[in-house]
Amino acid sequence: MPAQTLLSFRAGKMNRENDTSNNVVADTRKGYIQLLNEDDLLHFQWKERSAAEAEDDLIIFPEDAKFVPVAEAVDGRVYMLRFESSKAKHFFWMQVPLLSICSSYIG
């Protein structure tokens, strides 16, 4: 069964400055986030816009992950995907032009 795209929006990745830092810096590549349903699994993917394959492909299990705004980001466009089971954190920044569009995607 082919993958079904549930949601897609423009977003960039962010990376920690170094292994011990709590600061993140933006990866300047243009990309997007997709939520896909494939083989009864929910995939959270990040792709560079010009790429055919996802650079990040994370499986989301019910109640295990949260996509939340980062309060310390003064522009309100930085979000964190946090996994409860592993405490892994992935950071992204919205590349959409209006904050109201961002809030329509994030509940």
Image (tube, grey):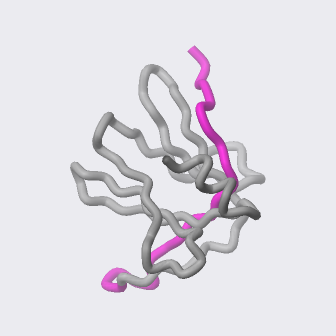
Q: Position of residue 37 (x, y in %)?
A: 51, 27
Q: Which residues are magenta?
A: 1-21
In this image, 98 relative to 104: left or right? Answer: right
Figure check: 18 above or below 44: below
Q: Quadrant of residue 97?
A: bottom right
Q: Residue furthest front?
A: 100
Asked if residue 3 is among those painted magenta in the image, a careful observer would answer yes
Q: In this figure, what is the number of numbered marks?
A: 0
Viewer-side residue, 94 vs 49: 94
Q: Position of residue 95 (x, y in %)?
A: 70, 63
Q: Residue furthest left?
A: 85
In this image, 73 relative to 103: left or right? Answer: left
Q: Residue at x 43, y 21 (%)?
A: 40
Q: Residue at x 60, y 25 (%)?
A: 4
Q: Residue at x 61, y 19 (%)?
A: 2
Q: For the N terminus, which image quadrant?
A: top right
Magenta span: predominant SS is: strand
Q: Position of residue 42 (x, y in %)?
A: 45, 32
